[in-house]
Image (tube, rainbow, N blue to C red):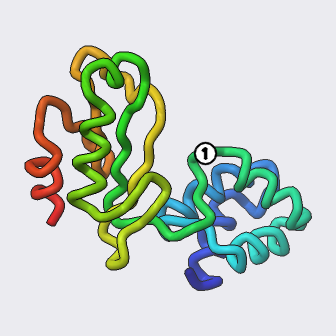
Amino acid sequence: MDNAAIDHIINKYQGQARFLIQILMEIQEENRWLPREVLKTVSEKLDVSFRQVMRIATMYKTFSLVPKGHNEIHICMGNACHVRGAERLLKEVQELTGIKPGETDSDGKFSLEIGCCRGNCCSGPVMEIGGKTQDKMSPAEALKNYE
C-alpha cells in the first residue's frame, strides 16, 4: 500500500488520532492486512506512538498483521456448530485448501480462520466465505464458487 492511499484514508478523518481504529479498518479492508511499515506510517502521520498503534492492531481479532487471502473462510466452532459437525467441516476445508486455521494459501486465494458463533446457529455448522454465509452446503461445492 502506497503513502498516497494511506494519506487518502487518514485525510477522510482529518488526521485525527481518535479515529485510529477506523483508519486501520479501512487500510485493512483495502490492503487485506496491516504491514508493519504501514503501521509505522500511520503512527507518524497521526502523531501516535508506534507502540500504541501496535497495541490496537494486536488487541482486536479483526486486524491481521499477516497477509490474508482474497477469500477469507471462517468456520464456526461454537457449541451448536460443534455438535452438528464443525470438526468434520474444518477437516474437509483443510484438505480442500491445503491450509490450517490462521494460514493463507500460497497463491493468496484463501485464508482460513476458526472462531465462535457466526450468528446462524440453527443452520450449523456454519462456514462463511468472502463475507457470505454458507450453510447446508458441502465445502467442496461452496469453495467451487470461489475458484
Q: Is residue 71 left or right of residue 15?
A: left
The quadrant in which residue 26 appears is: bottom right
Q: Quadrant of the N terminus?
A: bottom right
Query: Looking at the picture, does residue 138 appear above or below residue 17?
Result: above
Q: Quadrant of the C terminus?
A: bottom left
Q: Residue at x 79, y 60 (%)?
A: 54
User: What residue is shown with label 1?
Assistant: 61
Q: Residue at x 20, y 37 (%)?
A: 134
Q: Is residue 113 left or right of residue 46?
A: left
The quadrant in which residue 65 appears is: bottom right
Kindly identify the amino acid type of the residue bearing the numbered disc 1. Answer: Lys
Using a 10 Å C-alpha cutoff, classify the residue at mark 1 as few (fewer than 14 neighbours), some (14 to 19) or many (20 or more). few
The quadrant in which residue 35 appears is: bottom right
Q: Position of residue 44 (x, y in %)?
A: 84, 74
Q: Residue at x 76, y 77 (%)?
A: 41
Q: Position of residue 31 (x, y in %)?
A: 50, 70
Q: Secondary structure at mark 1?
A: loop
